[in-house]
Image (cartoon, rainbow, N blue to C red):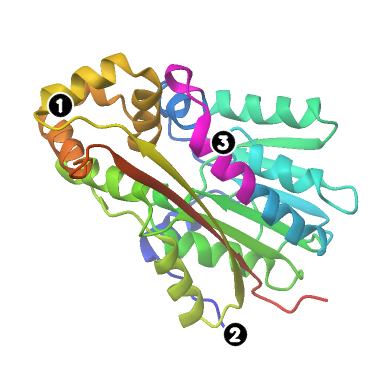
Amino acid sequence: MEIPHDGSTCLEAEKNVKASGDFPDPVPVSTGEWKYLYGRAFGVEGVMDRNHRQLFADVGTDLAAIAPEAIIDLGCGNGRFSLAVSARASTPTISLLLDKDRDLLSTAVAGHLANGSRAWPLLADVDFLPFPETLEIRRPAVLLSHVLYYSRSWPYLLSRVLRMIEHSNGCCVIVTRTRRSDSYRLRRAVRSAQNQENAAMVQSEVVAEWLTDHDVPFLSRMTRTDLPVPLPHGSEAALRDLLFQDSELRGLLALVCHQDPCTMDVSSFTALARSLAPGPEGGTLLSFENEALIAWPGSVT
């Protein structure tokens, strides 16, 4: 099996990085973005956290049978995924935590240490990985949880990771939203209204097709959580009034859209409201569906 060098622009950029290890400074992120993603925005924890906890637990159980020597969490965020995997490991492991946000990286390391897990932080961008072409680690487990959306070229990033672990009996876990998930549908509506590049974002179905096309074996784990939401009939003003009154719903939509719905520009809020159109009896059912694809680029023994 030959894993391609997809993404020529990123490949050339990485070739230009000095061999001394002088990697580009991580791209700064807004101080509020990660709070929507990983904090309890407006006091909400709820449905998204439950969905991810179940998925991370399922994947952790799958990886325990592999007994990874190291867990490499790329774009680790608050580190919950690698912590769930290390907690279920059948043998002691070390987690390498990589993120471009210092605050998130500090949170991730603190969480691992508080749970008695060994962790090593790396402040870097996933598109400029500070790793050799082939890892000298047996059975590494590389985690890419909701990271491909932010890569300059996700096919290149995925190719880079798979080549890196191909001869180490390692695996790569890619977590993305499915095309059916309302978290994908709502965020796409907002991003499209803002004319953002790659408004559609990559979905798990696309990644699965890419893996199949490149003869990379994988298995799938999926979680779905449904949430009934009371939505008013009528104008966008009625929806805005509801969001000001219902901090939990407001926080949930902030988590999904990566911005507070009550401070969106008019066109973005209109797109969100149309996507949230209630049914004939009022209210709607939001479904959150995430899928983990566990890929093995080489044989596993």
- Closer to the N terminus: mark 3 or mark 2? 2
Look at label 3 and name its amino acid. Gly
Give the main secondary structure of the magenta stretch: helix
Give the residue displayed 74% in from the left and 48% down from the top: 85
Direction right: furthest residue: 91
Give the residue displayed 74% in from the left and 36% down from the top: 120
User: Where residue 27 sits: x, y (%)?
Assistant: 43, 34
Give the residue displayed 64% in from the left and 36% down from the top: 79
Look at label 2 and name its amino acid. Met
* Mark 2 lies on residue: 1
* Mark 1 lies on residue: 265
The answer to whether the residue labelled 3 contacts the one labelled 1, judged by CB atoms less than 8 Å apart, is no
Q: Is residue 25 visible?
A: no
Look at label 1 and name its amino acid. Asp
Mark 3–mark 1 Cα distance, whole angstroms, equals: 27 Å
Asked if residue 44 lies in the magenta stretch, the reply is yes
Mark 2–mark 1 Cα distance, whole angstroms, equals: 48 Å
In the image, which is nearer the foreground, mark 3 or mark 2? 3
- Closer to the N terminus: mark 3 or mark 1? 3
In the rendered structure, which segment of residues is drawn in magenta?
A: 40-55
Name the side, left or right, on which 121 lies relative to 286. right
Provide the secondary structure element on which disc 3 rests: loop
Give the residue displayed 73% in from the left and 73% down from the top: 167
In the image, which is nearer the foreground, mark 2 or mark 1? 1
* Mark 3 lies on residue: 77
Q: Is residue 221 above or below residue 177?
A: below
User: Where residue 44 sits: x, y (%)?
Assistant: 47, 23
